[in-house]
Image (cartoon, rainbow, N blue to C red):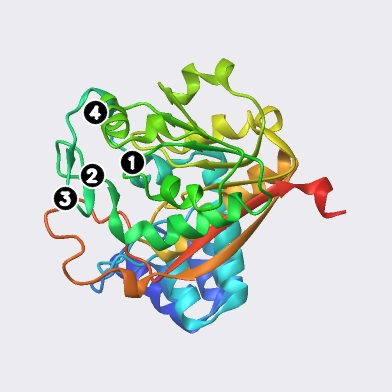
Amino acid sequence: MEENKEESLCAAARTGDVFKVASLLKSGADVTYFDRDGLTPLMYAAKNGWAEVVTALLDAGAPWNALSPSNLSAGDFAMESGHQSSFDILLNAGIQAELILGTIARKDSAKANPNGDYLDDRVTFSEDKVMDRESKAVMMAWEKPLMEAHAKTICSGGGHVLNIGFGMGLVDTAIQQYKPLSHTIIEAHPEVYNRMLLTGWGEKKNVKIIFGRWQDVLSQLKSYDGIFFDTYGEYYEDMREFHHHLPHLLEPGGIYSFFNGFCGSNAFFHMVYCQLVALELEHLGYFTQLIPLPVKDCLGEDTWEGVKHKYWQLDTYYLPVCQCSDDSE
């Protein structure tokens, strides 16, 4: 019956009947349909590993980023079920879509304030977090092991180091342990900047603090052997803009890294952005290695108490290590 066309499409996708799927699509079945369980035909095809059906549904306009009631996309289902071919097809579809539209990062960018006025907000400091006025976390103590790993990465070559975004000072404290020749910190929030001065950061011999947005102080920067980027109140497009300055800021053989928190509530979306950033950096001449770090033990039950947005909900963090592609030759 006509009204069962979409249910038939879900059934055909579930069983991998590519000819039935093609016939139903040709007859006008709605490829965006969610059944009573909250699943789409694409989710069923991905969950069962029917790569040919996945391709047919994507070609017909099935949304790769639709979410089930349990916050899982078709890519998550393919990943959880171990269906590599379907996963690869969906990952490529996601990367291509985000290159054109960038919708996920704009909606769910980690550490991004949609109001765009973070620098004018009051922030509150406590022992384990810095919060904005909406009770969203600017930085939290659970990130300390990650920041220590980032610091070790960008300081591995010694020399001169640049960090953009002080926050709680976790990465900068770790950087100091490696005694770089110089340690430049850019911080744009006036209250965070004042706190830096009150806690003695302006008196450290090898530290230079630059107050302002990184976009406004580029003329004050030199070139560095290690660079870390971790801003709050910005979106993916801001980091992409910063990446275009890397050839002038990063010394040959230097290491660049950034807080890789994009789409931290969905494993597949996060993987899309890991690959997307690596691809865009590759076009700029940089090779990116992603080092998996388990973080489940860092996130206790009370971690997010009082925090409005859980910006990280995954068990693994992928630490990016970026170097000029020519350096590996």
- Residue extending furthest toward the right: 329
Label 1 neighbour load within 10 Å: few <14, some 14-19, many 20+: many
Foreground disc of the pair 4, 3: 4
Badge count: 4
- Work out whether mark 4 precedes mark 3 in sequence or the reverse, and give the earlier one: 4
C-alpha gap between disc 2 and disc 1: 7 Å
- Regarding mark 4 in the picture, which secondary structure is present there? helix
Quarter of the figure with the N terminus: bottom left
- Regarding mark 3 in the picture, which secondary structure is present there? loop
- Work out whether mark 3 precedes mark 2 in sequence or the reverse, and give the earlier one: 2
Name the residue rendered at 52%, 54% in the picture.
150
Instruction: State if disc 3 and disc 4 touch (CB < 8 Å).
Output: no
Place of residue 134 in the rendered image (x, y in percent of width and height, measured from the top left): 15, 39
Is there any visible trace of residue 22 in the rendered image?
no
Q: Which residue carries the number 2 mark?
A: 130
Closer to us: 86 or 326: 326
Q: Which mark is residue 191?
A: 4
Whether residue 23 sits left or right of residue 281 in the image: it is: left
Q: Which residue carries the number 3 mark?
A: 308
